[in-house]
Amino acid sequence: MINENTNQKKVLFVLTSHSELGNTGEKTGFWIEEFAAPYYFLKDKGVDITLASPKGGQPPIDPKSELADFQTPATDRYNKDEETQLLIANTVELSKVSSADYDAVFYPGGHGPLWDLAEDKESIALIESFYSSNKPVSAVCHAPAIFKHTKNTEGQPLVKGRKTTGFSNTEEDAVALTNVVPFLVEDMLTANGAIYSKSNDWAPYAVEDGLLITGQNPASSELVAEMLLKRLG
């Protein structure tokens, strides 16, 4: 039997497994909108998506992302979508995935990645493997934290000399977490030699530079997915 989906693109979504917001006693995790908007955009275009996280199973959801102020058509859809909720509850353990099986990788944000994915050796190796295999690496909001330790084939920071964006210092200040987070995304990208740019706080803004696609904040997540789909052809 002929497989009609031989040209179907496969994208790996990597979610945080970290749930503690520093020493505040509050919870964090991934931001629902930053998962849901790109997920449904790509899924509706026929992309096959696999969900993974460092620990596997249910990744923590940032409770603030469930508040009424932050609901969008994508989050409303997710809240009614038991099939996708089941997939989220059973993410694949990151150590069991290979870049060879996918055409691209996407990292949703939330504050969680600042603690685990930024330092996770499996994630770092995975990103470097995608990039060296000429496959797009995309991340939104706090998820560009993943580029803290990633290197290119010359051993330089992966983002060095590359146009990037991510959650800005002014946005972190606006949510009063500047002194809680382990590092600021904007400062880290700049320190790693990236050409960082941003738009107004909370405005949709995404940057593509070769294989790297980054978005500034939650409102930018679908824009990143649009750029990624175009890149995948």
Image (cartoon, helix red, strand yellow):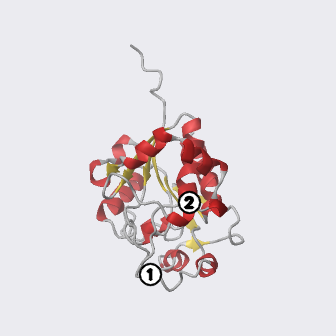
Q: Is residue 131 visible?
A: yes
Which residue is the site of mark 1?
24
Which mark, by number, is residue 40? none
Question: Horizontally, is 17 left or right of 7 in the view?
Answer: left
Please report the residue visible at 40 percent of the width from the left and 82 percent of the height from the top. Answer: 23
* Image coords of residue 128 (percent x, y): 37, 59
Q: How far apart, in angstroms, are the residues tagged by discs 1 and 2?
A: 19 Å
Residue reaching furthest to the bottom: 179
Work out whether residue 122 or residue 76 is closer to the camera in this orientation and state it.
Answer: 76
Instruction: Assign the C terminus to one quadrant of the image.
Output: top right
* Image coords of residue 218 (percent x, y): 61, 61
Location of residue 101 with respect to 156 vertically, above or below: above
| Residue at disc 1, secondary structure | loop
| Residue at disc 2, secondary structure | helix
Instruction: Assign the N terminus to one quadrant of the image.
Output: top left
Work out whether residue 200 or residue 127 is closer to the camera in this orientation and state it.
Answer: 200
Q: Residues within 10 Å of mark 1 (few under 14, many from 20)?
A: few
Location of residue 182 with respect to 213 vertically, above or below: below
Work out whether residue 118 or residue 64 is closer to the camera in this orientation and state it.
Answer: 64
Q: Quadrant of residue 60?
A: bottom left
Please report the residue visible at 58 percent of the width from the left and 56 percent of the height from the top. Answer: 33
Please report the residue visible at 44 percent of the width from the left and 81 percent of the height from the top. Answer: 24
Please report the residue visible at 64 percent of the width from the left and 53 percent of the height from the top. Answer: 223
Which mark, by number, is residue 66? 2
Q: Residues within 10 Å of mark 2 (few under 14, many from 20)?
A: some
Q: Report the amino acid beneath label 1.
A: Thr
* Image coords of residue 48 (percent x, y): 47, 37
Q: Report the amino acid beneath label 2.
A: Glu
